[in-house]
Amino acid sequence: RTSHSTMATQTEETKTAEMINMNTQQPTQSVVKAEEDKDVDMSLFRDPNQKKREVYTQINLTRFGDINGVDQTFQGHFQIDFYWVATYEEKQQWDENGQTEDNWKPKWIPQPTIMRLSNATEVISWEIMMDTKMRDIVLLPRWGKLMWRRRYIIVAVFSESLELESYPFDIQNFSMTLQAVEHVNTWAFLPLPVPEDNAFIKLKKKFSPLSEWIYETGCVEFYATDPADSFTGKQFSLITLDIKCSRRWQTQFWNMMLPMAVLGSMGLTAFSIEIHESPEGRLGYAINIVFTVVAYQYVIRSQLPQIPYLTYMDYYVICAFSFSVILLVQPAILAALI
């Protein structure tokens, strides 16, 4: 009995010692992990309790052109980069999975389903651009933060209401607007935190066919919609890329304005026909000039959309038409008086 009780006591003491060792080992591991976390600069990461996500944007306009003055449309081909700050937990999971997108990706990504091109009449393509390692999302150190980056290549046809009062000496502003479809308190577009001498928008002019236009300047606007424009009173983040171009007026001058001026001058040659000898000859000559001016007017109007106002070119055509009518009426009155 004495030996059995001694063995039982020793067994209990052994179990107690093992439990003590286990309890002492667990705090040691947690302390090591806490020390590792303490060495990490948490300012590099996003606070997971922060509700609003800030999405930094960079745009590379690779092609701009195909401007249709009648339909008031143009085509834009651009690359857009989205950057947003990662959390520390996302960084750990990214490292554990070998930094490959095939194994793991963050829960929130700016997908095409949560944004739209507001003034696009047709989205030709919206594709993800892979990096050199065929990853569609990467984690990079940028501007004092660890940021996720995703790139898209977008090709679309956009509509733009042209302001043609000063045609053919007009300057047009072509806009491409990308709008978030979630509330502005959820996430919003922001410009890249880059120095002022660096640009977060780039335009490749050599790939932009602007035969009738001259590129002037470009800018990007970041703003939110007016709550009054929404039935629910919500605001949505917007990013608008504006390209300002001026028309090459020399084409219209040599093809339209100069020939009409010559026609008007040729109408003066009708006075070489004596009214008392051939009044019908002078009238026929003047009528041909009037019809030619009208034909030119139809050609000019075919190059413009339906607009409820007159352009500079319209005023020029009206003056040429009025001068031709005067040349027509003058011999008619003289022929009646003779």
Image (tube, rainbow, N blue to C red):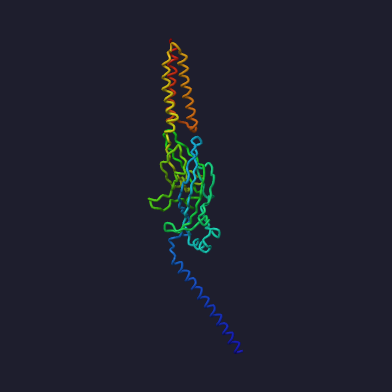
Whole-percent x and y of residue 138?
50, 57
- 289 above or below 309? above
Whole-percent x and y of residue 317?
44, 26
Work out whether residue 65 or residue 326 is closer to the camera in this orientation and state it: 65
- Quarter of the image where the N terminus is located: bottom right
Whole-percent x and y of residue 3?
60, 89
- 102 above or below 70? below
- 13 above or below 177? below
Q: Across the whole image, how many numbered discs are drawn on residues?
A: 0
- 11 above or below 59? below
Work out whether residue 7 or residue 248 is closer to the camera in this orientation and state it: 248
Whole-percent x and y of residue 265?
41, 22
- Quarter of the image where the C terminus is located: top left
Q: Farthest top residue?
A: 338
- Image position of 1 (left or right of 200): right
Q: Quadrant of residue 171?
A: top left
